[in-house]
Image (cartoon, rainbow, N blue to C red):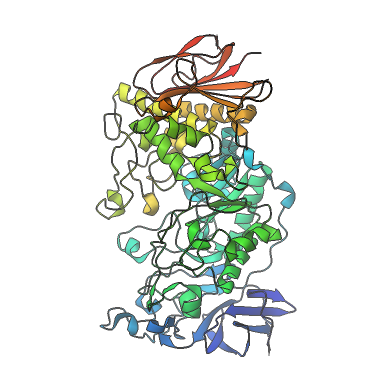
Amino acid sequence: MLHSGRPFPLGATVRDGGVNFAVVSEHATAVDLCLFDAAGNEQRLPLTAHTEGVWHVFVSGVSAGQIYGYRVHGPYEPHRGQRFNHHKLLLDPYAREIVGRFDWRDAHFSYQVGHPDGERSFDSRNNAGAALKARVAAPLPATASAHRPHVPVADTVLYELHVKGFTQRLAEVPESLRGTYAGLAHPAAIAHLTALGVTTLSLLPVHYAIAERHLGEHGLTNYWGYNTIGFFCPDPRLSSTPADPTATRAEFRTMVDRLHEAGLEVVLDAVYNHTAEGDGRGPTIAFRGLDNALYYRLVPDDRARYENWTGCGNTVNVPHPRVTQLVLDSLRYWAAEMGVDGFRFDLGVTLGRTGLAFDPHGAFFVALQQDPTLAHAKLIAEPWDLGPDGYQLGRFPGRFMEWNDRFRDSVRRFWLQRDVGRGELVRRIAGSSDGFHHGRRLPCASVNYLTSHDGFTLTDLVSYDHKHNEANGEANQDGHPGNFSTNCGVEGPTDDQAVSALRARLRRALLVTLLTAQGTPMLLAGDEIGHTQRGNNNAYCQDNDISWLDWPRADRELLEFVRRLLRLRRTHPHFRVNRWLSEHANADGHKEIEWLRPDGAMMTVDDWHDQSRHSLAVMGGDEHLRMMALFNAEPAALEFTLPAGRWRIELDSAAPDRETGRVVEARHTVESQSVVLFSIVV
């Protein structure tokens, strides 16, 4: 039996002995709900009720497990921005469970592939047999919110990882669970994370995604997952039970609960800037067929074309109220029902574009910050996209943190290229005040990182002068050419002990710089064990041992060094100060931070502008606990004159096992390309 139902909530909702279906399409002339039985037979139910652009119906007698999709009627006029084609079965954008497997078939396109008229042609084949379909999901029990860690931002250490790559080669995890949500929740995986000392996992995309057609033609896949089509559904490729969407949801939830019990937060990398439907030559899977002009940003003077500010073919029309609602509903679902603790917004500038311009007070940001369900969520932006004025580092609102590529590049250049001076290094390790010291923003808004999924690993950063992406099938033309890396004299693997020792020293110096700087540090999973991608700096399509962490050959000495560094960060409050430190003396003559030359004198204006010198000392802390770091990126050892007092060596990156605990006064020699950390002996 059919009733008009309700326009809210959107999606399929089990209630009152049936299911309420609601879907948005402002420009459709008619919408059919399509129900499928176990044999794949289709029953079409015309939706006659629509309220403010929402088509809705209540169907009694159906329940969780019902498979369904939509067919939407309207004009097929690409030049006017609409591409309705009721012959194509459409996926519900709010689907919690998705069944089927997407294979690249010409029947999935609204136009006739290969036709002389291209996108203006019309394809009338029924693709239902091969289309992705939604399945009505039963409500999940309440999340175990009592275990949420709620790590203060000043104590946060981010750890970016891929769910599959992290455990695929981890022998302590049962083979059946490797590379899955359950694998990440396994005690062996959690033991590594807790012993390492990170607080917050930043997971590469886990929303339901599909691989681009050209990758399949080369025998590759979209390993990273930045090609979303289901914003409410965990990706089955990361599940130990991929054929069962209900079990996959439960597995994801259990993973989050186990990580929470271990004190670890979970942040999702969320891709709301584009969808897997691509440009006008792409398939019709969901949004394009529901209401192309509503869901996508179209070129104003040629509405057959898509604004491509993402580099992925299309740009989601987030300023539209219904699309803002979609994104917020998705965020609330993952936070409230799936238990996650925050989000990293891929190409975050796209979400803040109202017209062409980026607006930090745009409707989406205002709604996000006012939402009570998301009030405690960590929010992280990738502060750029490919649109006009697409670089917006430091301009995001409120409690947003932002990936700081200036930190990445400047620290790399200081240590590996020596083509930036001390002033640039200091700006970065002091919280990047030139980008973030305005309004009420604080140093922890800067997410400091050396490496991420996109680019070289830390080991490759000191092992390759050039990218080596031949395995991607694009003749090494993909990936960014500017890496600010060094091969230390040999490109790639080497048996030369001197080269290997130099690479190890540089890795340690880079890590000390990262993990003692003001701001929120982020480690790339695998950097702590010396993982290499063999020089591939764009491994998005490498679902193999190029990307999977190489646990069998883990560098245990490097791992212990990173653990020690993170223990130091936790132990010494100076490394976790989330306020702008003053260089001016207070009434007692105390300065929160001081910058010194190697001879012990205060840095002068001329010293800051001297691009030929790459050494300095920084001293900070309160009257009771002073910390000092000596940086020497010069090619030779250098003697430093120390401030008055007795100084205990906490860590020497050149000799991490030799110097710890020794007390020195007056002078100390710092080996080339290394950092020494001291604490004052009271």
Q: Residue drawn 51% across and 30% down? A: 562
Does the image show residue 71?
Answer: yes
Up-down relation of residue 630 to residue 395 (above or below): above
The picture places residue 441, in percent across and down from the top left corner, at 60, 46
Q: Residue drawn 27% across and 79% down? A: 114
The picture places residue 369, in percent across and down from the top left corner, at 65, 58
Q: Residue drawn 27% across and 34% down? A: 491
Q: Nearer the viewer, residue 184 or 379?
A: 379
Quarter of the image with the N terminus in it? bottom right
> In the rendered image, which quarter is residue 465 located in?
top left
405 sits left or right of 93 in the view: left
Does the image show residue 531?
Answer: no
> In the rendered image, which quarter is residue 504 located in?
top left
Up-down relation of residue 429 to residue 628 (above or below): below
Quarter of the image with the C terminus in it? top right
Q: Nearer the viewer, residue 606 or 680?
A: 606
Q: Nearer the viewer, residue 83 or 584?
A: 584
Q: Residue drawn 44% across and 28% down? A: 605
Count of numbered circles in the view: 0
474 sits left or right of 362 in the view: left
71 sits left or right of 49 in the view: left
